Amino acid sequence: MLNHRFRVSCSRLFAVCITVVASLSMPLAAEPIIPAAPQLAASSYILMDAETGQVLVSENADERLPPASLTKLMTSYIAEREILEGRIGLQDETLISVKAWKTGGSRMFIQEGKMVSIEDLLRGIIVQSGNDASVAMAEHIAGSEDMFAQMMNTYAERLNMENTQYANATGLPADNHYTSAEDLAILARHIIQDNAEFYPIYAERSFTYNGITQANRNSLLGRNPAVDGLKTGHTEEAGYCLAASAEQDGMRLISVVMGTSSEEARAQETQKLLTYGFRYFQTAKVHSGDEALYTARVWAGNSEQVRLGLEEDLKLTIARGAEGDLSTVLNIEPVLKAPIEKGQVLGELLVRQGDEEVTRRPLLALEPIEQAGFFKRIWDYILLFFFNLFNGN
């Protein structure tokens, strides 16, 4: 976390403006030089900080493209939500239908009329990229693949995946079945954060079912020790695609590369993105959610002060070496009167990097302040009257 020192000034309206300047324990280096992002041999790509959601690199990231088996990221996401929310269990079993058994393309090799556990199906989807497993899971959760596709679209809307529409659970070519690199990065971020319990499955190098062992098609697993997920995809229409995530030095990145020419190309182009992100950027913790950023005067309360802070940790993606450029400004309501509820918005925090505004966050009361007794309130109102009078209000 960055250390800070505060400069406080008050306007005639008593609005408090506090500038927080990053204070480092070492001399400030010259402004970091960041080269242009790599240009990839791909139709579309994006690089995102998984923690902050900030996009570091993008090219045609909102273009609607066929996703091939990257579709299965939504299939697995929904299955994981169903498990976590208690509607199905890992040890539940489902009867494999003729449709699931006959589904072509990459397969888990489940057999019609056999019972298969949800846990095996989940690994069949994530590790083996089984189309048959995806259809079986869809039928178990929603009754049919068509109904499951409706669920997929509802989830896509809920996750603000604005350039996505699903027609099936597998990614096999279909009309009106598309997504974008940006939407896939958003989905990957939700898998990592919402379904953390299941995320280690995406790093598994192989899975054996019915005596058949199949390797994970993500060739960066093992080749790059920082990479621990997520999923590959390929059809003639989509080309070779890869959604990957990697963690290094406390920073997690998500990359999505779509429309490359080969398995090796999608791995190489992904590696270029990840190398660039880790080399030139970092995830910086600017303020803690439980940190009191300022203590403000309260009128007519059983306490004369209230601590102000943020709802949660504030983290930003910044260039390596750019910590000294960060400054924080707190704009606080000019007059705070009790009662005040915990979590009540009492101002705003602005973060700037140099002259550029980076983010704004609401500034909240960290504890409740109840009204004072009658005589204390009268005395405070008298003081407040003269306070306003002498300050020109």
Image (cartoon, rainbow, N blue to C red):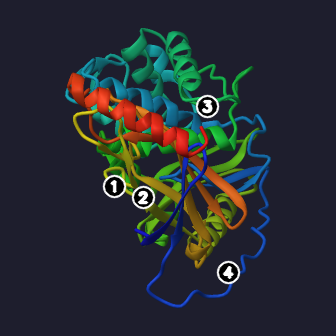
Disc 2 target residue: 287
Q: Amino acid at mark 4?
A: Pro
Which kind of residue does numbered mark 3 sit on?
Gly
Q: Classify mark 3: helix, strand or loop.
A: loop
Q: Is residue 212 visible?
A: no
Q: Nearer the viewer, residue 166 or 253?
A: 253
Q: Position of residue 254 (x, y in %)?
A: 55, 54
Q: Which residue, given by chain and number where applicable, does mark 4 sit on?
A: 32
- Split into 4 quadrants, where in the image is the N terminus? bottom left
Q: Does the CB distance between marks 2 and 4 fall below 8 Å?
A: no
> Mark 2 against mark 4, which lies toward the viewer?
2
Extreme bottom residue here?
27
> Contact (CB < 8 A) between labels 1 and 2?
yes
Instruction: Count the numbered circles shown.
Output: 4
The three-letter amino acid code for the residue at tag 1 is Glu
Q: Report the residue at 44% width, 86% height from top.
A: 25
Crowding around mark 3 (Cα neighbors within 10 Å: few <14, some 14 to 19, many 20+) is many
Mark 1 or mark 3: name the one nearer the start of the chain: 3
Instruction: Please state the horizontal and vertical placement of residue 171, each as a whole percent of the image.
Output: 61, 31
Question: Which label's residue is closer to the chain start, 3 or 2?
Answer: 3
Q: Residue at x 36, y 28 (%)?
A: 81
Circle 3 is placed at which residue position?
A: 171
Whole-Å distance between the Cαs marked 1 and 3? 46 Å
Q: CA distance from mark 2 to mark 4?
A: 22 Å
